Image (cartoon, grey):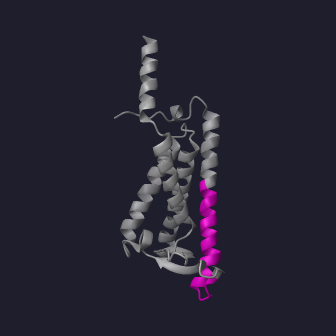
Amino acid sequence: MKKIDVRKLFYPEPKKNLIILGTELLLIGLYLAVDLLTKEFVYMPIAAGADDVIVWEGVLRFTAVENTGASFGLFSDSFVALTVVSFITVTVLLLILIFSVKIRNGWFRAALILMIAGGLGNLVDRFMFGYVRDWIYFELIDFAVFNLADSGLTVGCVLLLVFVVFFYRPDDKKKNSKAGDAGEQ
């Protein structure tokens, strides 16, 4: 088994890479804080008996839904499985964020930040309440009730898809590696 030299992770620009990673972790924390604060100050009063907040009649409403499942209520009442899967997924994404710090593509970095923050937001809910607090409801299209964490996950997945389709080129790395090898001979 090959050992990982963590020092090489941040070289040749250790300060710059640490600043980038620190900024990204701060952004994750900020998004998580906004998600949890909106759940506290919008969801909780409605769940405690206040009326739904109608933002735009027939279009957008804030309500309170306890989601014990995943997206669209799938896998309802699967607390342990969903919590374990969420924890593993967030951990893996966090490791990818750290070990890919040299990849400077904004689409990729933003995707990871949003997916980690969204996953953490829903994971905190699962640990604290046993369900996810959903509160945004688009009545116009009768869409599933969701929250900011769900939005982060969705937008993050779309950004990752954009990165993979338009920017990720695995052949470029192989070509650069072969060109470097040829130049050394």
Task: Residue at 60% x, 38% y: name it.
Answer: 17
Image quadrant of residue 74? bottom left
Q: For the view shown, which residue lies furthest in the left direction? A: 1
Task: Residue at 59% x, 81% y: name it.
Answer: 58
**Relative depth, front residue between 169 and 87:** 169
Question: Residue 175's x, y, as percent?
Answer: 43, 25
Residue 41: within the magenta? yes
Determine whether 80 is above or below 20 in the image: below
Instruction: Judge left or right: residue 174 versus residue 119.
Output: left
Which corner quadrant holds the C terminus? top left
Instruction: Look at the magenta stretch and give its main secondary structure.
Output: helix
Question: Residue 139's x, y, as percent?
Answer: 55, 78
Question: Residue 64's x, y, as percent?
Answer: 55, 80
Task: Residue at 57% x, 50% y: name it.
Answer: 110
Which corner quadrant holds the N terminus? top left
**Relative depth, front residue between 29 and 75:** 75
Determine whether 92 is above or below 167 in the image: below
Determine whether 12 is above or below 68 in the image: above
Image quadrant of residue 79? bottom left
Question: Residue 140's x, y, as percent?
Answer: 55, 77
Residue 63: within the magenta? no
Instruction: Judge left or right: residue 62 versus residue 8.
Output: right
**Relative depth, front residue between 21 and 57:** 57
Stretch in magenta = 28-53
Count of numbered circles on the image: 0
Task: Residue at 38% x, 69% y: name it.
Answer: 80
